[in-house]
Image (cartoon, rainbow, N blue to C red):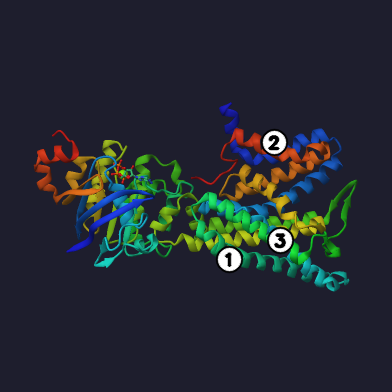
Amino acid sequence: MDKLSETLGRYGGVNLLPVVLAAIAFVLIGAPSSWVTLTIAGLSMGMMVFLMASGLSLVFGLMDVMNFGHSAFISFGAFVAASVLAALGGWLDSDSVLLASAALGLALLAAITFGLAAGLFFETVIIRPVYRDHLRQILITMGALIVSEQIILAVWGGTPVTVPRPSFLDGAWIIGDVSIEIYRVFAFGLGAVVFTGLYLLLNRSRIGLLIRAGVENREMVESLGFKINRLFIGVFMLGSALAALGGAMWAGYETLITPALGGEMMIVVFIVVIIGGLGSIEGTLLGAIIVGLTANYIGYLAPKLALASNMILMMAILMWRPSGLRPAVK
Amino acid sequence: MTLLSVKDMKTNIGQYSVLHGISFDVPEGGVFVLLGRNGAGKTTTLRSIMGLWQPSANSVSFQGQDLSGMGTADIARKGIAYVPENMGIFGGLTVEENLILATAKGTFDQKRLQRIYDLFPAIEKFWTKQAWSLSGGQKQMLAVARAIIEPRALILIDEPTKGLAPSIVAAMGEAFREISQSTTILLVEQNFNFARSLGRDMAVIEDGRVVHTGSMAGFAADTELQGHLLGLSA
Ligand SMILES: Nc1ncnc2c1ncn2[C@@H]1O[C@H](COP(=O)(O)OP(=O)(O)OP(=O)(O)O)[C@@H](O)[C@H]1O
Ligand SMILES: [Mg+2]
């Protein structure tokens, strides 16, 4: 048994879980073309959920702050991007790929900018007074979440909003009898770029070194002469911006959004963060991919179990590894 | 000359009053030892100096400047390093990364680094290893190395010999003797023999108060006082 886990460890250990999952699904699904479609859908959903979840994981890891309001950034990101895309409808409808790309770029940028600003506001006004007090954090961030949802309702109304998207991302590539939705590939690619950027930031820069050290022991980082609060504002803003970006991408994926979007995704985001292990983006990515794949495979194999499947997955993983698959060292 | 002066320091942790009046003066140079039984308040004293707990107003002055009320990062930047009881090593970071974080600019002064290699060869040997994989003694060496990688005026060290093998304790003693040539050390220690061999001045804390302060030589000679204050049977 030890030998087995050692060999597994050499080939990637828990990182192999998505591969194992995909292999089992391949056998159960039987039809290779469906399997490819579902796997790509799962990977792209995983990447979008990663965007939404990475900030929450770092924020909790660095300051032990439980932010139940995190889903507000996801919702706002989705609606802000949808509004920008709607306003630039002319660009989207034109035949120019350049104009359509510009519209998409501006929409994502607007979501990110909104996330940064909202993150700054949220951290200084709502979170700052309740550092180190979990009960109040839960209450006040829940309160902020309700207020945010009401604001969205007031601004965008309760009826579903259609999200236009550039025509070059619509449709699918057909390879043999496999159909690959272009938007999913785009979402996966964008997520991969963000992950790489975050990974380099955390592992190759001094700020990243400070963040990793702070996740482990913030008192010691302070004792070495660094102000952890400043670092935390930066991380919080970054996390909010990524959540908003994730929301914007999700809006384009769903193409029809309601104010409930943030809340629905939040359950998935919490599961991902808990499965992956708090405070590490590698863990968050792993958790997100596993959850994305499971949701799609089960959705196909046993649609009635789709909702429960991720909860069951979380419980199974926590029984095996109580602090998640790849938590930050504490 | 007095480097650090603690005057009637009182510290509460939450609703508990833990320190009721700590006073002692640490002169510049050498090793000053804080002694006391378990739970006496030694760690709380160091943490209060460091600003990790909030001490009473005007109770800590360093180089003539009041530290009470300052944030921990600002206190550190005045030239005080802290080696906590649990060593505070960043296990997920490499030995090199642990040390680079302790430098102000993110680059090493090669002379100081060489001095650390000379004091603690294990640091050089395990340079690229993640710190969690080090032994207890090596972690302690890394914690001390982190405190001296930049020039500092004062180092607070909390029970550095706890749980270490005698040979490592001896090496640690040698290192402290060398370090104290250039940097003042405020040392909390339960190992009285170790403390006696290093200390110039000392204070004894009991139940949140300083109950004795004086020279180490005087205290070491007075076995009755030791028995009374530390419960040591000489
Ligand atoms: N976080 C805390 N919350 C409440 N009480 C605390 C806390 N930390 C310490 N105390 C109390 O303060 C008193 C002094 O503790 P402190 O850790 O300073 O003692 P110490 O002299 O360092 O002991 P030791 O030799 O065991 O390390 C103890 O009675 C302890 O129970
Ligand atoms: Mg102690």
Along the line of sight, which residue is nearer the eye, B137 or A62? Answer: A62
Visible in this render: residue A93? yes
How far, Cα to Cα, is label 2 from label 3? Answer: 32 Å
Q: Secondary structure at mark 2?
A: helix
- Residue at 22%, 49% (x, y): give it: B209
Q: Residue at x 87, y 54 (%)?
A: A173
Q: Secondary structure at mark 1?
A: helix
**Label 1 amino acid?**
Leu
Precedes in sequence: disc 2 or disc 3: 3
Q: Is residue B187 above or below residue A122?
A: above
Residue B170 in the image, given as x and y percentages of width and height:
24, 41
Tell me, for residue A312, which label it has, or none: 2
Q: Nearer the viewer, residue A89 or B81?
A: A89
Residue A18 found in image quarter: top right
Q: Are the residues flagged by discs 2 and 3 in contact, CB closer than 8 Å?
A: no
Q: Label 3: which residue?
A: A150
Which residue is identified by label 1? A120
Q: Chain of mark 3?
A: A
Amino acid type of the residue tagged 3 in the rendering: Gln
Using a 10 Å C-alpha cutoff, classify the residue at mark 1 as few (fewer than 14 neighbours), some (14 to 19) or many (20 or more).
Answer: some
Q: Answer whether labels 3 and 1 touch (C-beta < 8 Å).
A: no
